[in-house]
Amino acid sequence: MPAPPIGGVRPKPATSMESLIGAHWLNRIGIAALLVGAAFFLKYAFENEWIGPAARVGIGLAAGAALLVWSDRFHLRGHRMFAHSLEVVAVGVLYLSLWAASETYSLIGNGAAFTGMVIVTAALVGLALRHESEFLAGLALTGGFLTPVLLSTGVNREVALFTYVALLDIAALVLVILYPWVRALAVAFFGTLFLWIGWFEAFYSASQRARTIGFITLFLLLFAAVPLFRRWEERGIAGAALLLVPFANAFVYFGEISSMVSDSSRLAKYAVALAAFFVVVAAALRLRGEEREDLTAVHIALALGFVTIAIPLQFHQLWITIGWLAEAAALLALSRTASGAAGTAFRALGAFALAAGVVRLLLIDRFHPLHPIWNMRALTYAIAVAVFSGVAVGSVRFRKLATAMLNLLALIGLTAEVSDIFRGSPITRAFAWSALWMIYGAALMVIGFRRGNAFLRWLALILLGLTIFKVFLYDLSELERVYRILSFIALGVLLLAISFAYQRKWIGAQRT
């Protein structure tokens, strides 16, 4: 006698190809064949006027209702797959019968057809709750969002349409609170988006802006409330989908706002408001004791992302760079306290903001300081150096890259300040560059020796190599005799000192 399963749970039997074909494929093919046959028969009967319009609609409604009742019996017997197939057919027949009664035969008004479709949707929601079926919930919501499309009259009824959509979204929210039905949530989100796009392309005008923004803000709040009303423990694909919902909700909303608001300053205010809103949601999740740290982290990342968007919309030139550098520092600091996917997301966002800030600093920003050293250019470079210093201290993996970048930016910034100090004398400025690079290289070499850091010494050697090329290729031919003599003597003394240090083996322990 085989041993009973551990914990009383029977293992799920493996699905063979034979059972897959017999139970699933033949089921669908049989349903399709039955539908096609019935459709051809009805078409033949209609063409020969065996059945009048009212009878045609009546047959469709009766058949749809009968299929729904029949499917419920299969649910109770445990044949969920077959029941779902019948439900798809039933819903299709019911919706098409109501649509034909209104649009093709004019047997009933548009309002009556709409009411009938709402009743079908409500019945499906009831069945979904009765059988705890995510499939039925998704089917009901799909039918609900198709109803305005099927019964569209080409007339702008914004308030009625979006009030109806809001009720569907509230129904979806209730379903998701009761059960972890991610697919039902996805149907509601994309159904709302597609109906809004269709209406916007056909009917939107500037005079409707305030009301339209009110409706899409309501939709934003409904979908943003999902993680507040339900604890999500799902992992895998479902868990990943749940992390995408806040991103999709936020950026779809901002895209909709951008399509209606062209003023950049006003858009910046919306971005800041969104950032504040997602900070509040993250705080609420934390206060509630949300076990999924990645869900909280996603909302913090969204807040910082909208700050990133707001900076270039509201500010100009170097303040954009300073804002992105400051945001990079905040994100990278958060990445050290977060774990798992949240930490990875913060590191990626922080690296992106830092790269954007450096690119702007080096390639886009143009500075015209009135005073050397005490100016916004020096401040911006100092902030960038400070951020890379923090990365060098806190990250073993990126320490060398951050060390190289902080020294590169410091050298570029100091060279720019020296250039401004000697702006009126090109020859003196060229000599000052050489002197600065020698001093900086010597300082790096000393630090490298004292700390036993081979990487710093290599950086010093690279900088001194560039200085050698400059002295021999430029200073030798362009500088006046006094500066030329000083350049060569200073370089020679420095190189001899470094050589002596290497010969005396003052390197110390090879710590990198």
Image: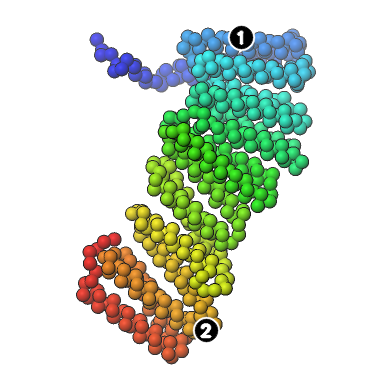
- Amino acid at the residue labelled 1: Ala
Based on the displayed image, in which of its 4 quarters is residue 392 positioned?
bottom left
Disc nearer the start of the sequence (2/1) = 1
Residue identifier under label 1: 66
The picture places residue 221, in percent across and down from the top left corner, at 59, 34
Residue at the image point whose x is 60% and y is 26% from the top: 170
Residue 358, placed above or below residue 246 = below
Residue at the image point whose x is 49% and y is 43% from the top: 300
Q: What colouring does the structure picture have?
A: rainbow
The picture places residue 210, in percent across and down from the top left corner, at 71, 40
Q: Quadrant of the N terminus?
A: top left
Label 2 vs label 1: CA separation? 96 Å
* 61 left or right of 292 in image: right
The residue tagged with tag 1: helix, strand or loop?
A: helix
Residue at the image point whose x is 64% and y is 29% from the top: 166
The residue tagged with tag 2: helix, strand or loop?
A: loop
* 65 left or right of 361 in image: right
- Amino acid at the residue labelled 2: Ser
Residue at the image point whose x is 38% and y is 42% from the top: 339
Viewer-proximal residue among 33 and 143: 143
Residue 176, placed above or below residue 60 = below
* 377 left or right of 494 in image: right
Asked if residue 313 can be seen in this view, the reply is yes
The picture places residue 321, in percent across and down from the top left corner, at 53, 59
Residue identifier under label 2: 425
Near mark 2 (Cα within 10 A), the count class, few <14, some 14-19 or many ≥20, is few
Q: Which tag is nearer the camera, tag 2 or tag 1?
A: 2
